[in-house]
Image: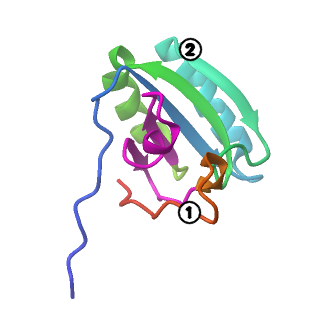
Amino acid sequence: MPSSPLPKRPTNDYDQYHAHVYFDADSVELASSICHQAGELFDIQVGRVHQKLVGPHPRWSCQLSFSKDQFDRLIPWLEENRNDLTVFVHALTGDDLADHTTHASWLGESVPLNLTVFGIEGAVAEEKVSS
């Protein structure tokens, strides 16, 4: 039986980041609570709790915006407090496609992204190894 690759953990390699907390109708209140707690605890910007698909995200989501200075405290907190929710973490380098593929990692289950929003017809990001 082939062994699975080691999980790709979020690493603090860039100046700015987004974390997208994914949820569904059954977990919207939990996701909203996690995002607003993170906003208060870490003084980060909390986006809307989108109960619709937005951008390349295949699930409803709430966006957290943060810097490299907040990364090392926020990411472990999200890992510990996300419950079973998936969190997609990516850098903000100005290259949206690379940010959502090469410069991205997951807390929890990885989910293929809809890359057609970046002008790549029919493209879906391959699932990355979850952490």
Which residue is pictured at 43% across the width and 49% down the height?
A: 101
Magenta segment includes 107: yes
Front position among marks 1 and 2: 1
Q: What SS does tag 2 mark?
A: helix
125 w.r.t. 39: above or below: below
The circle on residue 124 is 1
Which residue is pictured at 42% across the width and 28% down the height?
A: 93
Which residue is pictured at 40% across the width and 39% down the height?
A: 80
17 w.r.t. 102: above or below: above
Q: Sort mark 2 into few (<14), some (14-19) or many (20+) by Cα contacts within 10 Å.
A: few
Residue nearest the viewer, comparing 59 with 40: 59
Rendering quarter of residue 14: top left
| Residue 114 position in % (x across, y down) | 62, 56
Residue for badge 2 = 40
Q: How is the image coloured?
A: rainbow
The circle on residue 44 is none
Q: Sort mark 1 into few (<14), some (14-19) or many (20+) by Cα contacts within 10 Å.
A: some
Side of 61 relative to 1 (left or right): right
Which residue is pictured at 56% across the width and 63% down the height?
A: 124
Residue nearest the viewer, comparing 75 with 57: 57
* Lower sequence index among marks 1 and 2: 2
Which amino acid type is marked by label 2?
A: Glu
| Residue 121 position in % (x across, y down) | 64, 61
Magenta segment includes 47: no
| Residue 29 position in % (x across, y down) | 72, 39
29 w.r.t. 27: above or below: above
**Region in magenta:** 87-113
